[in-house]
Image (cartoon, rainbow, N blue to C red):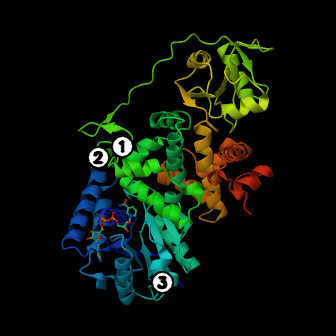
Amino acid sequence: MSIDAQKQDLTIGIVGAGAMGRGIAQVSVTGGMKVVFFDAAEGAAEKGRDFIASMINRNVEKGRMEKAEAEAALKRLSIGASIGDFTDCDLVVEAIVENIDIKKKVFNQIEEVVREDTIIVSNTSSIRISSIAAACKHRSRIAGLHFFNPVPLMKLVEVINGTDTAADVTAALEVIGKRMGRVPVVVKDAPGFLVNLGGRAYSTEALRIVSEGIATPFQVDDIMRDSCGFRMGPFELLDLTGIDVNFPVSQIIYNGYFQDKRLSTYPLHESMMEAGRLGRKTKAGFYEYAEDGSLIQPEPEAPVTADPARRVVLAPEHSGALDSILRDLGVSVLKEDDGVSPILADPIGEDCTALAVRLNLDPKRLVAIDTHTGVYSRATVMAAPGADDDIVLSVMAMLKQISGGVTRIKDGPGFVAQRMRAMIANLGCEMAQIGVASPEDIDKGMKLGLNYPLGSVEMAENMGSRNCFKILEQLQAITGEDRYRPSQWLRRRALLDLPIHTRD
Ligand SMILES: NC(=O)c1ccc[n+]([C@@H]2O[C@H](COP(=O)([O-])OP(=O)(O)OC[C@H]3O[C@@H](n4cnc5c(N)ncnc54)[C@H](O)[C@@H]3O)[C@@H](O)[C@H]2O)c1
């Protein structure tokens, strides 16, 4: 039997008063629970307590919290002189340095002093919970409780089930997570857990697209923000988190999944690290930053000055979305090819080259428009190598009349938005397939942990699971790469036309 997670005076021991331990202590005391706070470094817990007091008092000043409530919360926080002061704790959270040997030792010390039903968790980001538990006497009470930085602002907490974690321990941690004002998701003990794994597709596919010369980092970022609703483009995000952080994490997760190509990053990532272009912290990454840290805007692309196309031919295969865009533009669509007008298509997953060959279209005049995420905020166009530039520019000028921006990329399967979204969705579906978490929790994790506009499983539904599946099949066929193999979760639901969250 595990602890009563609902009990009023639930006491939490927190070891480690660094960035994470402080945040966890703050949400614990504001959540009405008692905290015993300990850090091995002299004065660190006291400094942590002062920091928490300043954060809580700031909330009072801003009118987010009553003064009496703040005082009561701070009274619930006490400093421990050693791990020996955790004897009465119902839960102990370890948030010390990320070192497995030190963590194991600290877990052993905790086990020495706590009750037999006390739950002990680690806030580790990268160490397998089962590896820590393997050093413990009672493995069923060991779990992960993975918070995000800064804890008071990040609502998500991953409850990580080790191989031997008891079901009532998981359930108790979900209750305590909620009492801390967090949104818990239950996650399997696997490399990168949920959020760090789920976030791989966004950066690695973007690096891939840029490495293939299909688009620049700035173009990819513009498309992901404007067409797909992401708050930050993948390259802005890589610069913000730091290449020295995200490159090693990518490698750990890739190797943790035994080199599954879907998770591989690209040499460009390593080159940036080797070059010391680590992002904002070095004032240079994919972008350049001024001394005061502000972004130096990259050179804008040359404005499109061509005359807009007024007559176009449509490829025999195209979507209703393209018809409606052309209607909005008032462009005349020729019934017969006049041999000079642009030929427009909006392929799903195919590049212009494959489309021109398959449908026997003039590759010089074929211009593909990505209608999948719409063209009104930003339109993306591409054409095959050797295409007539004047034709492409006339189509861009035509789209400019209704669009916030027009981006021309090089020929590539799935443009940028389709490809990026399909890869994010595929990883989300694969995570559901291998039981990293439930499909609903995967979506919650991606939205709350990474600010995605949609969860990654939901994204497949939003794209239409058949479209998503088709994009991946095309990418796999055109590139010949295992990286694009569709998840079986996606394949089955797409083929059977079932809602993507349908359980097995
Ligand atoms: N910082 C993040 O963004 C983040 C996010 C999620 C998880 N984590 C994980 O949380 C843990 C802590 O990270 P952090 O960023 O707060 O680290 P930090 O370096 O800010 O703080 C660690 C604290 O632990 C103390 N400590 C070290 N060894 C100790 C021991 N044996 N006994 C008691 N105290 C000890 C140190 O004195 C220090 O105050 C790590 O496992 C990390 O992977 C960090």
Which labelled disc corresponds to residue 285?
A: 1
Alpha carbon of mark 2 to alpha carbon of mark 1: how far? 7 Å
Category of crowding for the residue at label 1, using alpha-carbon neighbours closer than 10 angstroms: few (below 14), some (14–19), many (at least 20): many
Category of crowding for the residue at label 2, using alpha-carbon neighbours closer than 10 angstroms: few (below 14), some (14–19), many (at least 20): some
Label 3 secondary element: loop
Kind of residue at badge 2? Thr
- Give the mark toward the camera: 3 or 1: 1
Q: Is mark 2 within 8 Å of ligand 1?
A: no
Instruction: Indicate whether 87 appears above or below 79.
Output: below
Tell me where residue 4 appears, x and y as whole percent.
49, 78
Kind of residue at badge 1? Gly
Tell me where residue 63 appears, x and y as whole percent.
32, 48
Which labelled disc corresponds to residue 282?
A: 2
**Quadrant assignment for the C terminus:** bottom right
Tell me where residue 91 appears, x and y as whole percent.
42, 77
Kind of residue at badge 3? Ala
Instruction: Indicate whether 454 appears above or below 139.
Output: above
